[in-house]
């Protein structure tokens, strides 16, 4: 099922020269919005993410993560060290609307596919570069890898309890955020091209995505005497927010409680021990751990359903902490229709996620799986030969 011609990016061709996660995540979202995405890969081996396994599960010889982030794309196998292949890629770029690349700094220039070179022949090109730490400064040559970007960003000191040391996210958040920011920049550049004409060079990095991700708490730090945030020592859920914000064990699971006036919560929990803090909001910060220990001791006396029956009717912001299967089984998830089955011509079929955006009430659909290495090479070379 190809994208509908009514999709907002229908008719646009994206040449994705990137690999791993950040660039391919960006092109995946453009594909979901109707663009045609041609993925450049090395002959035979392809994108390194084909062998980036999150588990011992593979689908058709490739990792599940590769399938998740490259569904619906076309694969063109080219050897960029070969002069004829480079000439064809240059020809293909001149017929494309968008180019995405996340090569190590300096590589794209040596190949002759940098923006300054390409815009001479294609002034309307929207060109996107994604790096680890920008394109100048002492970190330029350092590996642009997610965990390392998290380590340099300060982000790890916001997770976990105070005594746990730095705690990384259990997701490749730097890659995903950089990809999302790149997509926003590309869309803005396309709008500008439609209004004024001319292309644009969009640049972002893993580090810039992580800094922007922290804009709320970093702004507090910059304007609060540069006091470093201190995580709660007990059941920390946010380095800055006061008690009762946190996750608490009940008899059959965990209950998350968000921003809530302590006095109201005390009445509902029937917890006299909170009286000294009830009307003193400053203590909700200064005595955060003591308050949370009292709440935790009370929450663990009942099951989740009992607490939700008490707290939700009183408009307390709370939720059961679900695992993935509980989420998938829930009506709240199912009504969103966020999963799909994708297929490939060699009988491969798998389940994955769908675009998180709806347009005029409709979620974009494309049930094509990720391609085999060079699966579309002949078709693309014939189509763009002239």
Image: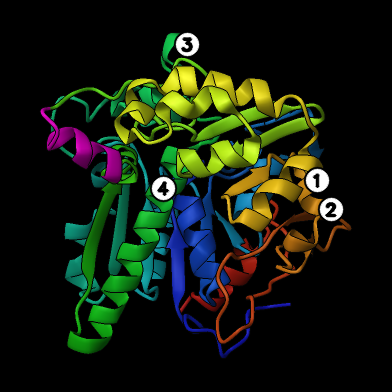
Q: Which mark is residue 350?
A: none
Q: Earlier in the sequence, mark 4 or mark 3?
A: 3
State which mark lies toward you, 4 or 1: 1
Image quarter in which the C terminus is found = bottom left
Q: Which residue is mark 3?
A: 164
What distance separates the C-alpha of mark 4 from that of mark 1?
26 Å
The residue lying toward the viewer, choosing from 126 and 90, is: 126
Q: Earlier in the sequence, mark 4 or mark 1?
A: 4
What distance separates the C-alpha of mark 2 from that of mark 3?
33 Å
Q: Which mark is residue 326?
A: 1
In the displayed structure image, the side of residue 45 where residue 233 appears, left or right = left
Judge whether 321 appears above or below 76 on screen.
Answer: above
Position in image of residue 267 (x %, y %): 58, 40
Position in image of residue 359 (x %, y %): 55, 81
**Residue 216 appears in which quarter of the rendering?**
top left
Q: Earlier in the sequence, mark 2 or mark 4?
A: 4
Q: Is residue 266 magenta?
A: no
In the displayed structure image, the side of residue 238 where residue 191 appears, left or right = left
Determine contact: label 4, label 1, CB under 8 Å: no
Judge whether 89 appears above or below 271 on screen.
Answer: below
Judge whether 90 appears above or below 1 on screen.
Answer: above
> What's drawn in magenta, residue-wise?
216-225
Determine contact: label 2, label 4, CB under 8 Å: no
For image coordinates 74% across by 68% down, the residue present is 337
User: Secondary structure under badge 3?
Assistant: helix
What distance separates the C-alpha of mark 2 from that of mark 4?
28 Å
Q: Earlier in the sequence, mark 2 or mark 3?
A: 3
Q: Main secondary structure of the magenta part?
A: helix
Q: Which mark is residue 329?
A: 2
């Amino acid at each position: 099922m190809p994208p509908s011609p009514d999709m907002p990016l229908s008719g646009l061709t994206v040449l994705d020269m990137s690999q791993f996660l950040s660039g391919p995540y960006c092109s995946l979202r453009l594909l979901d919005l109707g663009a045609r995405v041609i993925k450049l890969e090395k002959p035979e081996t392809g994108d390194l993410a084909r062998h980036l396994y999150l588990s011992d599960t593979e689908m058709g010889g490739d990792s599940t993560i590769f399938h998740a982030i490259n569904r619906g794309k076309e694969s063109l196998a080219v050897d960029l060290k070969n002069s004829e292949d480079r000439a064809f890629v240059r020809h293909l770029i001149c017929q494309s609307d968008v180019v995405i690349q996340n090569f190590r700094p300096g590589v794209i220039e040596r190949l002759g596919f940098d923006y300054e070179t390409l815009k001479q022949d294609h002034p309307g090109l929207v060109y996107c570069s994604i790096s680890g730490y920008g394109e100048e400064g002492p970190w330029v040559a350092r590996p642009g890898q997610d965990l390392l970007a998290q380590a340099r960003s300060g982000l790890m000191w916001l997770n976990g309890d105070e005594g746990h040391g730095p705690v990384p996210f259990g997701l490749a958040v730097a890659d995903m955020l950089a990809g999302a920011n790149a997509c926003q920049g590309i869309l803005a550049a396309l709008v500008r091209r439609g209004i004024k004409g001319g292309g644009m060079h969009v640049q972002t990095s893993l580090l810039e995505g992580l800094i922007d991700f922290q804009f709320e708490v970093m702004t507090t730090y910059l304007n609060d005497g540069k006091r470093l945030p201190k995580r709660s020592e007990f059941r920390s859920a946010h380095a800055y927010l006061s008690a009762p914000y946190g996750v608490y064990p009940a008899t059959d699971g965990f209950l998350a409680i968000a921003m809530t006036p302590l006095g109201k919560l005390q009445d509902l929990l029937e917890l006299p021990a909170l009286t000294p803090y009830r009307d003193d909001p400053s203590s909700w910060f200064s005595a955060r751990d003591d308050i949370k220990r009292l709440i935790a001791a009370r929450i663990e006396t009942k099951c989740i359903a009992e607490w939700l029956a008490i707290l939700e009717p009183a408009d307390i912001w709370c939720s059961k902490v679900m695992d993935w299967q509980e989420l998938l089984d829930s009506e709240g998830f199912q009504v969103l229709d966020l999963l799909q089955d994708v297929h490939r011509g060699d009988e491969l079929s798998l389940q994955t996620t769908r675009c998180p955006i709806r347009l005029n009430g409709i979620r974009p659909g494309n049930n094509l799986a990720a391609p085999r290495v060079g699966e579309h090479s002949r078709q693309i070379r014939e189509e763009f030969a002239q």
